[in-house]
Amino acid sequence: MGAVRAGLRDPNAAVREGCCRLLDHLVDTESMSALIAMVGDPDARVRIAVFHALACDRCKGDTCAPGADRVLDPALHHLASDPDRHVRAMAAELVGKFAHFEVRAVAALRASRAGDPSPAVRKKAGWFIPGGTIYERTRPSATG
């Protein structure tokens, strides 16, 4: 894990991306802060890998999934203003994880649904707002 964390600082973007992909499956609480810091990487492929790793519970379960307090603000920023449409799409997935209990998440997804220049990002944002397929499928039960 030390080598993977060190690879996040490699000058080669492909190495940084690969390390983010590894952390998607292997991330531990010790590595989470380093992974979150990568959302500002200058290479879009790295940012895509970071947002996937932060949003995807399938690969790692909820054992160390970061909370809204750690990842929502950077995800909102990238959803609204990242120059790369693929990064915005992955940011929408991370923002969508918090749509059931964060009004800022729903507002940002609605704004993206209405105004993102990419039809793919608009479509994905729509999945995570009330009435959207993923939002409805993941709605918490009323019984708690």
Image: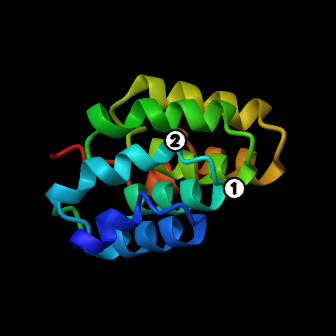
Residue matched to label 1: 86
Is residue 95 visible to us here? Answer: yes
Q: Amino acid at mark 2?
A: Gly
* Foreground of the two, 36 or 62: 36
Q: Nearer the viewer, residue 29 or 18?
A: 18
Residue 58 visible from this viewpoint: no
Q: Secondary structure at mark 1?
A: helix
- Residue 116's spot in the image, x, y percent? 77, 36
| Residue 106: percent from left, percent from top | 51, 31
Please identify the quarter of the rendering in which residue 113 is found: top right
Picture coordinates of residue 66 (x, y %)? 26, 48
Q: Quadrant of residue 2?
A: bottom left
Residue 59 figure quarter: bottom left
Q: In the displayed structure, does residue 81 sit left or right of residue 91?
A: right
Query: Mark 2 and mark 1: span between their CA atoms?
Result: 15 Å
Residue at image x 16%, y 63%?
Answer: 63
Of 135 and 40, nearer the camera is 40
Q: Are marks 2 and 1 in contact (CB under 8 Å)?
A: no
Query: Left of 98 or right of it: where is 46?
Result: right
Q: Which residue is mark 2?
A: 40
Q: Residues within 10 Å of mark 2 (few under 14, many from 20)?
A: few
Tell me the element at label 2. helix
Give the mark toward the camera: 2 or 1: 2
Kindly identify the amino acid type of the residue bearing the numbered disc 1: His
